[in-house]
Amino acid sequence: MGRLVTARSTRHWILMNSKFSLCRSRRGPLGAAPVNNGDRSNGFTLMELLIVIAIILILMLMAIPTIGSLKKKANETSAINSVQTIAKAQLQYESTYPANGYACALTALGGDPAAGAPSPTGAQILQADLAGGYKSGYIFTISNCTKVTINGTDRYTGYTVTAVPQTVGKTGDRGFCSDQFGTIKYDTAGGNNCTQALQ
């Protein structure tokens, strides 16, 4: 009788041990010794982790040029939109201050509303970043202003607005230009020698 109780206890202990064991080695049949698989753990080995990290790094290096290209494309699109915004602001400026004609500086199209009412030197038409001459990796300027003098007052009848990348090849590849007629052209070298019409 004592031998039967011992056998049951041992079997019960083996069952509990097989269910709740935290041992990482694989067990064989009930009551058998653990099967040795070279002490292979359930986790990853250092070599496997290094291979996974290397694959992730390779994928990231492949994606970096694509990300850079997308960023430049976004900057160029923003520059085109900004040139159009400046052209619209120039039309509004000419309509508001007909004696002055167009503005010959971005600062004249900008201005701080807290500084007072709009004026020919601060029309408060453009937002601050664009009036400051820099937005989304591009530098904006108004130049080549043509003027006529009427009753001792200069009236600007023409202008050129340019948008060039701050760093050619990094923040953008092309330069963009427009004038009082609103046509946008671009320079493939990233400068302000715009000869090709934007389509």
Image: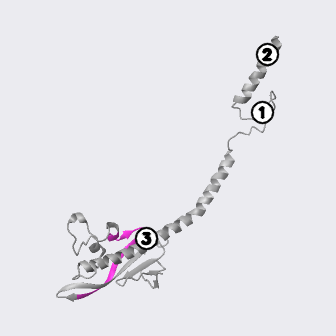
- Taking the image as shown, residue 108 lies to the left or right of residue 60, namely left
Question: SS for tag 2?
Answer: helix
Q: Disc 3 marks which amino acid?
A: Ser
Badge 3 density bin: few <14, some 14–19, many ≥20, Cα 10 Å: some
Question: SS for tag 1?
Answer: loop
Q: Which residue is mark 1?
A: 27
Badge 1 or badge 3: first in the primary sequence: 1
Q: Which residue is mark 3?
A: 78
Asked if 56 appears above or below 81 in the picture, the reply is above
Q: Disc 2 marks which amino acid?
A: Thr
Q: Which region of the structure is painted magenta?
A: 130-148
Image quadrant for the N terminus? top right
Q: Is residue 60 magenta?
A: no
Q: Which residue is mark 2?
A: 6
Give the image location of residue 169, x and y in percent.
Answer: 49, 72
- Mark 1 in CB contact with mark 3 (< 8 angstroms): no
Residue 165 visible in image = no
What label sits on residue 162 in the rendered view? none
The structure residue drawn at horizontal position 23% and vertical position 82%, both measured from the top left corner, is: 98
Badge 2 or badge 3: first in the primary sequence: 2
